[in-house]
Amino acid sequence: MPIYKAPVEDVNFLLNDVFQIDRYDNLPGFSDASADLREAVLSEAAKLSEEVLQPLNRVGDIEGCIRHDDGSVTTPKGFKQAFKQVAEGGWLGLSAPTEYGGQGLPVTLSHAVTEFQCSANMAFAMYGGLTMGATAALIVHGKPDQKKMFVPKMVAGEWTGTMNLTEPQCGTDLGLLRTKAVKQGDGSYKITGTKIFISSGEHDLSDNIIHLVLARIEGAPAGIKGVSLFVVPKILVNPDGSLGARNGVSCGSIEHKMGIHGNSTCTMNYDGATGWLI
Ligand SMILES: Cc1cc2nc3c(=O)[nH]c(=O)nc-3n(C[C@H](O)[C@H](O)[C@H](O)COP(=O)(O)OP(=O)(O)OC[C@H]3O[C@@H](n4cnc5c(N)ncnc54)[C@H](O)[C@@H]3O)c2cc1C
């Protein structure tokens, strides 16, 4: 049976002796990341990756994800429980700002944790990875109400995130994208188009999925200059933060890949879905 042993000693050596990370304690978060705390975080991360995530790697590869007729997607056995454990352990918010419920520790440390998780089970780690990426984009570029509405739930792992760039006619050259955004009277946009290869686009690990979607606003110039980014929740969020109606976005199919079967790589159909410009 394959095993995974996280390289805790090597990472400690890199952080302590090569990077001499304590020299950077004038940077935000670094002074909280003492040698003892780093050691504790890495040891716990190693345990999680070795004992929980790695044993699910083969299960994920054999079972894969299953799309049902209603467009919902079931992840492999054990993924849901493990994701709950990752979320409740605060692993998705290790480097997120404390004002959103994160622990505010350096990304240098959380990257080592991500490395353990990816090595143990890439397909599983991608659900959290995409969430952390979307969270970071919202923190840096989101409007204040968008940050308030989405970021704390994503940091807590109650909601997950995606990035929707690729379309059937464009991957590398995103200037060719056709997904359309039409402005509505209330300031929101109606998003229509098809995205392909969307990692973690649909699944059963979280209560909501927050899609970050590239689209072209009606009348915007052709090419890359006319591309804008929108936040489009799978389930619309009420002003009080509770979940409301289902939005016009659904998973049309999932890719059958050579590997990482445990991650749902989805075709996402946007049929006049409500989104907001980031
Ligand atoms: C497992 C998996 C997960 C993915 N997850 C996501 C996701 O979550 N969200 C998302 O939006 N997309 C996702 N993608 C899509 C991925 O981003 C695209 O596959 C990628 O952008 C490349 O696009 P393409 O496949 O259309 O290849 P192409 O753009 O057709 O490129 C094919 C080849 O041509 C080269 N090429 C293209 N244009 C030029 C040029 N002008 N000059 C020189 N060389 C060029 C490229 O370098 C490449 O080698 C995923 C893909 C995979 C396989």
Image: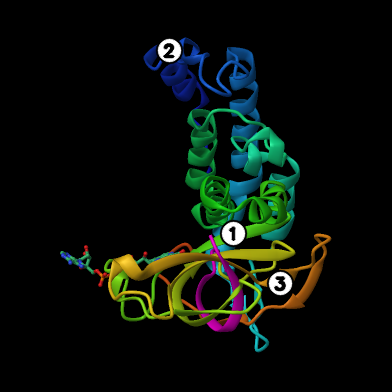
Can you identify the residue that label 1 sits on? Answer: 161
Q: Secondary structure at mark 3?
A: strand
- The x, y position of residue 272, in whole percent, is 58, 84
Furthest residue in direction front, as rendered: 185
> Label 2 sits on what residue type?
Gln
Can you identify the residue that label 2 sits on? Answer: 20
Judged left or right of residue 267, residue 82 is right
Magenta span: 261-278
Q: Secondary structure at mark 2?
A: loop
- The x, y position of residue 120, in whole percent, is 52, 45
Residue shown at 61%/34% (left/top)? 45
| Magenta-colored segment: predominant secondary structure | strand
Q: Are marks 3 and 2 in contact (CB under 8 Å)?
A: no
Number of the label disc, if any, that sits on residue 235 = 3
> Label 3 sits on what residue type?
Ile
In the image, residue 45 sits, relative to residue 159, either above or below, namely above
Judged left or right of residue 82, residue 201 is left
Q: Secondary structure at mark 1?
A: strand
State the residue in front, 112 or 170.
170
